[in-house]
C-alpha cells in the first residue's frame, strides 16, 4: 500500500468565508464573496440539539466507503467538513468549537458553565455509565452542524446541477467508519482517503479543484499553544497520527503505520466485538471500562475499552487520537464515534431490556464531580433539548429521536440484527463455523490470523457444535503511568525491541489503555479492565500443527508454557510490570455453543479460570 509519509502543503490565500487565514493547506474557492450567507442569529444556539426533519423513511448514516460511492453526497460531505474546519475558531459552529466540547481547550459551550473546581475538564464522560449515551447527542450536534453547511453548499451549485445536490442534501446524514469490518481483498481497514491523501480533488459549485483533505488532518486556524500545553502539541499546527520522529516539534504523520496497526489488530478487535454482542447482556458491564467486581470473570471487557484500542491505533504514540483531551480534533474521531453509536444501537436491539443504571462518577467532567451519582435521568451537558433542559439518557434511548438511523439497526428486528452481526463480525471466530460447515464445504474463507498454512479441520475446533474460547482478562490502574499505554500478549519468543511488537507475527493481541496527565483534573487511581482474545491466534497454531486442539487439556499447558506479555508506554519505551500499578492478567476459557442458525448468536457457558499470567 502506498502511504505517503511526507506532508506537502501549498500555502494559498483563501477566499472562503471571508475570514480564512493562510496557514498551510487550502479550502475550496467558491469564486465569490459568501460571507453574508454564513451566520444567522439562531446559530448562536447550536447547543440546542434538535432532530433533523425528514419525510417518509428515516435517513441513514452510511459507512464512509459506501457514502463515497454517492458522488453528490460525498462532494457535499467533503466540502462541509472543509468549510467547518476553515471557520473562525470563535464561531460556535466551527470545527474548533464543536470538537472542543469533548476536552481541550476546556471552554464553556452554549453558556453551560463549569462547576467550581472543574474548569480544567471537557464535558465528555469516560469510565462512566453515560459513555455511550453522552456521545449520542454529541454526534447529533455535530450532525446538525454539518447538515446546515451541506444545505448551504448545495444551494450554491449552478442551476443545472443544483437539483441533484439539493436532493442528496435533503437526506444527508454523517457517515461512520466500521473499523471491525474485514476490508475488501487488497485493501486496508484504514481507507486511503482517510490516511493516504493530503489533498483531495472535488467537483464543487465552482468546478473541479484540489483542496486540503479535511479527513486527513485538521489544521488549527490558528493554533493557540496555551490550549495544547503538552510538548510537542504546542508546536503542531495540525492534528497528527503516529507522529514521527517521536516527540519532535517537526514530526509528521505516519498513516502507513496506522493502517498496518489496524489491519494487524483486526482479528482481536472483531473477536472482542462479537463477544460484546453475544456474552455481555448487561448495559452496566457492556458500556464502560470501570472495573466492576465480577465473581464470574466473564465481563472484563466493555465497548469503551474496545473503543480505547481504536483511539490508540489511530493516534499511535502521542498522536492526537491517543490523548483523550485532544482526540476529538482529529477528523477520524466522529467517524469512529458514529460507528460506536451504531454498535450501541445494534446492541440495544439485541439486549433491549437493559439500560443505564445508576453509578457513581469515577472521573470528573466539566459539570460532574467524582462520586456524583449518574443515572438515566442525569443531564447530558451541554446538549440542550429545549431552552431550559438538557437531554438525558432515557430521552436518547431510541436514537431515531434525532432523525437518523443505520441500515444495520433501523428495523429494530432482533433476529435480523443478529444475522447481520453473524455475517459481519465472525471472520476470526468459530462462532458460526458449524453453521457454515453445514451449508458450504469446509473451505470457508476464514482468515485465521496466523495461518496462511491451509485449512483447519472443523473437528479439531468443534465438538458437537461446541468450542472453547480463550481470553486474557486484564485489569490495571488507568492513570498508573499518567499516559496512555499498551499491553501486548505474545505466543512464543518476544522480540527484543518495543518497536517490533506491534507487527510481530506471534503477537496475539494488545489492549490499549487510553489515559493521560491532564484530561481529568483531580482523578485518582481507578481500576479499568479489558480483554485480549486468544482464540483466533490459537486456531492458527492448531491449523499449523503446533497445538492439538482448543481443549483445555491441550491449550492450558500450551499457554502456561508459551504465553508472555510486555507493556509499552505511549512514548515507545518498555515499562516493567512492577511499575504498572494494579496490573493483573488472568487466563480464562469458556465453552461456547456455536450459532445453530443465522438468527442466533453463539451462546457462552460459564467461564473457567486457568492461571494468572501476572
Ligand atoms: C474571529 O472572530 C473574532 C471574534 O469575532 C475576531 O475578533 C477575530 O478577528 C476573527 N479571527 C479571524 C482570523 O478572522
Ligand atoms: C419534505 O417534503 C416537502 C414537500 O415535498 C419539501 O418541501 C421538504 O423540503 C421535504 N423535506 C425534507 C427534509 O426532505
Ligand atoms: C462518480 O464519480 C466517479 C469518480 O469521480 C466517476 O467515475 C463516476 O462516473 C461518477 N458516477 C456518477 C453516477 O456520476
Ligand atoms: C489535482 O491533483 C492531482 C494530483 O496532483 C492532479 O492529477 C489533478 O490534475 C489536480 N486537479 C486539478 C483540478 O488541479
Ligand atoms: C489562548 O488560550 C488562552 C487559554 O485558554 C486564552 O487565555 C487566550 O485568550 C487564547 N488566545 C487567543 C489569541 O485566543
Ligand atoms: C505553525 O504556525 C505558526 C504560525 O503561523 C508558524 O510560526 C510556525 O512555524 C508553524 N509551525 C510549524 C511546525 O509549521
Ligand atoms: C526535524 O527532524 C529531523 C529528523 O527527522 C531533525 O534532524 C531536525 O533537526 C528536526 N528539526 C527541528 C527544527 O527540530
Ligand atoms: C476469577 O479469577 C480469579 C483470578 O484472577 C480467581 O482467583 C477466581 O477464582 C476466579 N473466579 C471464578 C469464579 O472462577
Ligand atoms: C424487546 O424485544 C422483544 C422482542 O423483539 C419485544 O417483544 C419487547 O417488547 C422489546 N422490549 C422493549 C423494552 O422494547
Ligand atoms: C423543556 O422540557 C422539560 C422536560 O420535558 C419541560 O418540563 C419544560 O417545560 C420544557 N421547557 C420549555 C421552555 O419548553
Ligand atoms: C424479523 O425478521 C425475521 C427474519 O427476517 C422475520 O421472519 C420476522 O417476521 C421479523 N419480525 C418482525 C416482528 O417483523
Ligand atoms: C453442529 O451442531 C450440531 C448440534 O447443534 C452437532 O450435532 C453437529 O455435530 C455440529 N457440527 C459440527 C461440524 O460440529
Ligand atoms: Cu472516543
Image: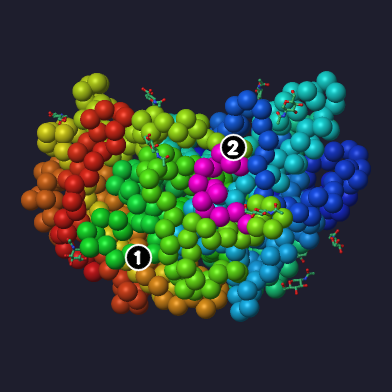
Q: Is residue 566 above or below residue 184?
A: below
Q: Kindly tell me whether residue 489 is visible in this rendering.
A: no
Q: Is mark 2 within 8 Å of ligand 2?
A: no
Is 394 one of the magenta-colored residues? yes
Name the residue tied to disc 1: 291
Report helix, strand or loop for mark 2: loop
Looking at the image, which is closer to me, 1 or 373? 373
Q: Is residue 207 above or below residue 486?
A: above
Q: In this view, does 135 lie above or below 542?
A: below
**Bounds of the magenta span?**
390-402
Circle 2 Cα neighbour tier, 10 Å, few/some/many (<14 / 14–19 / ≥20): many
**Which quadrant would the C terminus be assigned to in this image?**
bottom left
Q: Earlier in the sequence, mark 2 or mark 1?
A: 1
Q: In this view, does 493 lie above or below 167?
A: below
Looking at the image, which is closer to me, 413 or 177? 413
Name the residue tied to disc 2: 404
Is 140 one of the magenta-colored residues? no
Can you tell me which quadrant of the image ligand 2 is in? Answer: top right
Structural distance between the alpha carbons of marks 2 and 1: 33 Å
Q: x and y percent of residue 206 in the render? A: 84, 32
| In-image side of 272 versus 360 (left or right) | left
For image coordinates 60% across by 75% down, the residue present is 118
Q: Which residue lies furthest to the left in this view?
A: 553
Amino acid at each position: 500500500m502506498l502511504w505517503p509519509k511526507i506532508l506537502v502543503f501549498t500555502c494559498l490565500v483563501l477566499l472562503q468565508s471571508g475570514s480564512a487565514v493562510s496557514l498551510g493547506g487550502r479550502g475550496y474557492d467558491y469564486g465569490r464573496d459568501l460571507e453574508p450567507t454564513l451566520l444567522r442569529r439562531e446559530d448562536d444556539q447550536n447547543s440546542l440539539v434538535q432532530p433533523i426533519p425528514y419525510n417518509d423513511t428515516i435517513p441513514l448514516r452510511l459507512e464512509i466507503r459506501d457514502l463515497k460511492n454517492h458522488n453528490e453526497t460525498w462532494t457535499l460531505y467533503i466540502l462541509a467538513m472543509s468549510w467547518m474546519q476553515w471557520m473562525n475558531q470563535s464561531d460556535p459552529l466551527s470545527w474548533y468549537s464543536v470538537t472542543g466540547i469533548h476536552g481541550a481547550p476546556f471552554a464553556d459551550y452554549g453558556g453551560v458553565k463549569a462547576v467550581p473546581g472543574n474548569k480544567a475538564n471537557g464535558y465528555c464522560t469516560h469510565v462512566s455509565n453515560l459513555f455511550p449515551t453522552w456521545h449520542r447527542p454529541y454526534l447529533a450536534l455535530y450532525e446538525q452542524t454539518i447538515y446546515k453547511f451541506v444545505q448551504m453548499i448545495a444551494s450554491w451549485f449552478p442551476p443545472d446541477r443544483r437539483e441533484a445536490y439539493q436532493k442528496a442534501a435533503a437526506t444527508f446524514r454523517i457517515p461512520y467508519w466500521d473499523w471491525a469490518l474485514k476490508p475488501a481483498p487488497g485493501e486496508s481497514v484504514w481507507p486511503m482517503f482517510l490516511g493516504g491523501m493530503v489533498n483531495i480533488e472535488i467537483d464543487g459549485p465552482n468546478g473541479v479543484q484540489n483542496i486540503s483533505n479535511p479527513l486527513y488532518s485538521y489544521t488549527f486556524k490558528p493554533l493557540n499553544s496555551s490550549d495544547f500545553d503538552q510538548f510537542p502539541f504546542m508546536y503542531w499546527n495540525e492534528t497528527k497520527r503516529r507522529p514521527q520522529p517521536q516527540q519532535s516539534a517537526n514530526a509528521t504523520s505516519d498513516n502507513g503505520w496506522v493502517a498496518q496497526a489496524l489491519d494487524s489488530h483486526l482479528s482481536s478487535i472483531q473477536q472482542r466485538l462479537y463477544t460484546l454482542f453475544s456474552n455481555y447482556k448487561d448495559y452496566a458491564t457492556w458500556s464502560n471500562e470501570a472495573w466492576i467486581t465480577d465473581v464470574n470473570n466473564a465481563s472484563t471487557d466493555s465497548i469503551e475499552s474496545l473503543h480505547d484500542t481504536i483511539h490508540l491505533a489511530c493516534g499511535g504514540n502521542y498522536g492526537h487520537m491517543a490523548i483523550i483531551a485532544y482526540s476529538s480534533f482529529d477528523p477520524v474521531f466522529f467517524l469512529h464515534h458514529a460507528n460506536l453509536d451504531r454498535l450501541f444501537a445494534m446492541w440495544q436491539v439485541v439486549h433491549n431490556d437493559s439500560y443505564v443504571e445508576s453509578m457513581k462518577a469515577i472521573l470528573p467532567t466539566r459539570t460532574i464531580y467524582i462520586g456524583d451519582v449518574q443515572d438515566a435521568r442525569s443531564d447530558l451537558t451541554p446538549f440542550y433539548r429545549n431552552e431550559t433542559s438538557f437531554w438525558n439518557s432515557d430521552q436518547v434511548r431510541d436514537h431515531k429521536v434525532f432523525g437518523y438511523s443505520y441500515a444495520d439497526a433501523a428495523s429494530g428486528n432482533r433476529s435480523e440484527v443478529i444475522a447481520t452481526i453473524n455475517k459481519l463480525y465472525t471472520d476470526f471466530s468459530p462462532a458460526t463455523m458449524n453453521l457454515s460447515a453445514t451449508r458450504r464445504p469446509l473451505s470457508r474463507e476464514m482468515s485465521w490470523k496466523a495461518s496462511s498454512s491451509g485449512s483447519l479441520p472443523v473437528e479439531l475446533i468443534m465438538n458437537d457444535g461446541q468450542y472453547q474460547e480463550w481470553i486474557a482478562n486484564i485489569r490495571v490502574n488507568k492513570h498508573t503511568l499518567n499516559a496512555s499505554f499498551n499491553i501486548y500478549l505474545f505466543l512464543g519468543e518476544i522480540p527484543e525491541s518495543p518497536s517490533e511488537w506491534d507487527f510481530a507475527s506471534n503477537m496475539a493481541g494488545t489492549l490499549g489503555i487510553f489515559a493521560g496527565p491532564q484530561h481529568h483534573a483531580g482523578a485518582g487511581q481507578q481500576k479499568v479492565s479489558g480483554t485480549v482474545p486468544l482464540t483466533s491466534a490459537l486456531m492458527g497454531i492448531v491449523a499449523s500443527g503446533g497445538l492439538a486442539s482448543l481443549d483445555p487439556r491441550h491449550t492450558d499447558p500450551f499457554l502456561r508454557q508459551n504465553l508472555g506479555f510486555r507493556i509499552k508506554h505511549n512514548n515507545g519505551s518498555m515499562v516493567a510490570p512492577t511499575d504498572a500499578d494494579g496490573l493483573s492478567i488472568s487466563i480464562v476459557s469458556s465453552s461456547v455453543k456455536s450459532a445453530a442458525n443465522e438468527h442466533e448468536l453463539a451462546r457462552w457457558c460459564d467461564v473457567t479460570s486457568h492461571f494468572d499470567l501476572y
